[in-house]
Image (tube, grey):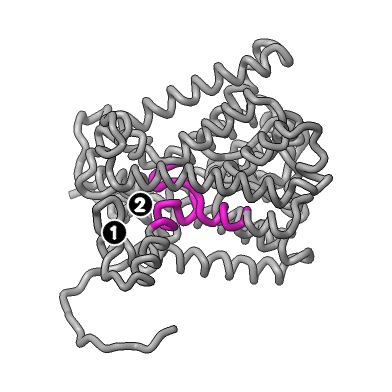
């Protein structure tokens, strides 16, 4: 038997190692490789009008691939058409998840999904063993393409008359991709502040944000059933939670900022104030767009928006954060405890204890990441504590909102933010599984009580 040449042996070893990775590890590696590929492309001379540093290229690529929206360079003026197209690809791949793209290619080539690939896709979309992955995959791509094309067509009604057909269509397509994938990148230097009172921009952008952030499984469930009572428990919680949270957030922002002359108080009409409050209520749930000056928000409003960014969007969506369903499970569990019930009950169904433990684990790990990130940023940076904490929560929730701190971050600070963006995108629990390499055991231990509270 002839010996395998060293280069070929190394390739075979790398291939075997990749195939042996667990789905959470493979998912994390995919986003890392996507960010590195984007860094190389954005560093090319044809990607920018003026040369940029490797750190700037890596930060922008990481922000785009994790669909965050934090920027250290002006997207519309610094990047060429090629560079902006690279950002579109990074946002699209990062929003849908590389596992979905990989499984689609495997499915087309082989005509079937192996168990390993179904497991990887379930990890990327955060689905259970019983979920029909082929149906979810087909719906994922069909719904995404449909919504992005519809968003492009509607936004073209605004930008084509202003910019002409070619530039106007590209503007519309860029913002539709950015909005549906909850990325928050804009080609306008003021983000969308110049469109604060435009009903078309407000409706289309927020519609794309909600449709991309509510979760593909919710969309699939709604398309397959006509009555609310027939929806799954997850779909019911997501629909009610999304509506309630958006309306409450709109009311809170409107009340807090109504008299602030630098934000809502400086707008000309009450209808414009309503549009601004609605837009800023929806966008913190990992979107990154803004129509008012985030730096000028009152401390109370900024702190409230930090809570929205931490909660995030829907499970298995383009959004991040701990997820709205996680937040609602914690609320239901707390209510059950206060009422001295053993299991939370909602819509005539009780929640499994494993779901509650998972929600608790996700929240605790997320809080640990945010606290640690804030601590590191207070060490590496100089600035108001609220601004530093806001930046950390925005990065972890891949929300993309900033109080003017991002471009002034040191090299160490940018590295902290990039790591938080990656952790927030792959999910804190996925990262914990990746690092801890968990294994099950059948050993049972005696039960004992611990005094708490």
Looking at the picture, how far across and down is residue 332, in whole percent?
37, 61
* 215, above or below 409, in the image: above
Say left or right for 153 vs 242: right
Which residue lies under the disc numbered 1?
Answer: 345
In primary-sequence order, the first of circles 2 and 1 is 2
Which residue lies under the disc numbered 2?
Answer: 14
Looking at the picture, how far across and down is residue 281, in whole percent?
60, 44
Looking at the picture, how far across and down is residue 237, in whole percent?
37, 48
| Callout count | 2
Q: Residues within 10 Å of mark 1 (few under 14, many from 20)?
A: some
Q: Which residues are magenta?
A: 305-328
Residue 368 magenta-drawn? no
**Is residue 9 visible in this depiction of the protein?**
no
**Is residue 255 visible in this depiction of the protein?**
yes
Looking at the picture, how far across and down is residue 199, in whole percent?
65, 25
The residue lying at 28 percent from left, 29 percent from top is: 226
At mark 2, the secondary structure is: helix
Q: Nearer the viewer, residue 393 or 68?
A: 393
Look at the image and tell me in which quarter the C terminus lies: bottom left
Residue 338 lies in quadrant: bottom left
The residue lying at 32 percent from left, 33 percent from top is: 222
Q: Nearer the viewer, residue 169 or 216?
A: 216
The CA span between labels 2 and 1 is 48 Å
Say left or right for 78 vs 283: right
Residue 141 lies in quadrant: top left
At mark 1, the secondary structure is: strand
Residue 318 magenta-drawn? yes
Q: Nearer the viewer, residue 86 or 134?
A: 134
Q: Nearer the viewer, residue 422 or 30?
A: 422
């Amino acid at each position: 038997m002839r010996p395998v040449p060293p280069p070929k042996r190394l390739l075979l070893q790398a291939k075997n190692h990749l195939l042996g990775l667990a789905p959470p590890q493979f998912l994390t590696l995919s986003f890392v490789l996507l960010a590195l590929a984007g860094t190389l492309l954005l560093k090319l001379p044809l990607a920018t009008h003026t040369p940029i540093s490797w750190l700037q290229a890596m930060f922008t690529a990481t922000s785009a691939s994790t669909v965050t929206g934090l920027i250290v360079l002006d997207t519309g003026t610094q990047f060429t058409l090629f560079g902006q197209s690279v950002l579109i690809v990074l946002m699209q791949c990062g929003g849908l998840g590389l596992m979905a793209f990989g499984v689609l290619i495997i499915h087309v080539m082989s005509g079937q999904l192996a168990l390993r690939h179904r497991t990887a896709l379930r990890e990327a979309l955060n689905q259970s063993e019983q979920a029909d992955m082929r149906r979810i995959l087909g719906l994922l791509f069909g719904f995404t393409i449909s919504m992005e094309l519809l968003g492009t067509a509607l936004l073209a009604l605004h930008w084509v008359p202003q910019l002409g057909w070619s530039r106007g269509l590209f503007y519309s397509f860029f913002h539709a991709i950015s909005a549906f994938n909850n990325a928050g990148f804009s080609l306008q230097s003021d983000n969308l502040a110049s469109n604060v009172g435009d009903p078309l921009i407000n409706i289309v952008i927020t519609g794309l944000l909600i449709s991309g952030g509510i979760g593909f499984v919710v969309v699939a469930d709604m398309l397959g059933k006509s009555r609310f009572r027939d929806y799954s428990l997850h779909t019911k919680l997501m629909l009610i939670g999304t509506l309630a949270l958006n309306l409450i957030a709109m009311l809170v922002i409107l009340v807090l900022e109504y008299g602030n002359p630098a934000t809502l108080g400086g707008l000309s009409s009450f209808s414009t104030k309503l549009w601004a409050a609605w837009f800023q209520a929806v966008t913190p749930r990992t979107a990154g767009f803004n129509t008012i000056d985030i730096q000028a928000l009152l401390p109370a409003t900024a702190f409230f928006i930090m809570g929205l960014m931490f909660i995030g969007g829907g499970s298995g969506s383009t959004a991040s954060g701990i997820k709205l369903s996680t937040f609602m499970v914690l609320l239901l569990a707390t209510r059950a405890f206060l009422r001295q019930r053993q299991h939370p009950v909602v819509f005539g169904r009780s929640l499994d204890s494993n779901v509650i433990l998972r929600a608790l684990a996700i929240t605790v790990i997320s809080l640990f990441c945010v606290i640690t990130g804030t601590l590191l940023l207070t060490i590496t940076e100089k600035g108001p504590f609220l601004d530093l904490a806001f930046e950390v929560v925005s990065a972890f929730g891949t929300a993309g909102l900033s109080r003017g701190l991002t471009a002034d971050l040191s090299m160490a600070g940018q590295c902290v933010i990039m790591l938080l963006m990656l952790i927030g995108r792959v999910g804190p629990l996925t990262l914990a599984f990746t690092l801890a390499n968990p294994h099950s055991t059948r050993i049972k231990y005696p039960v004992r009580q611990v005094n708490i509270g």
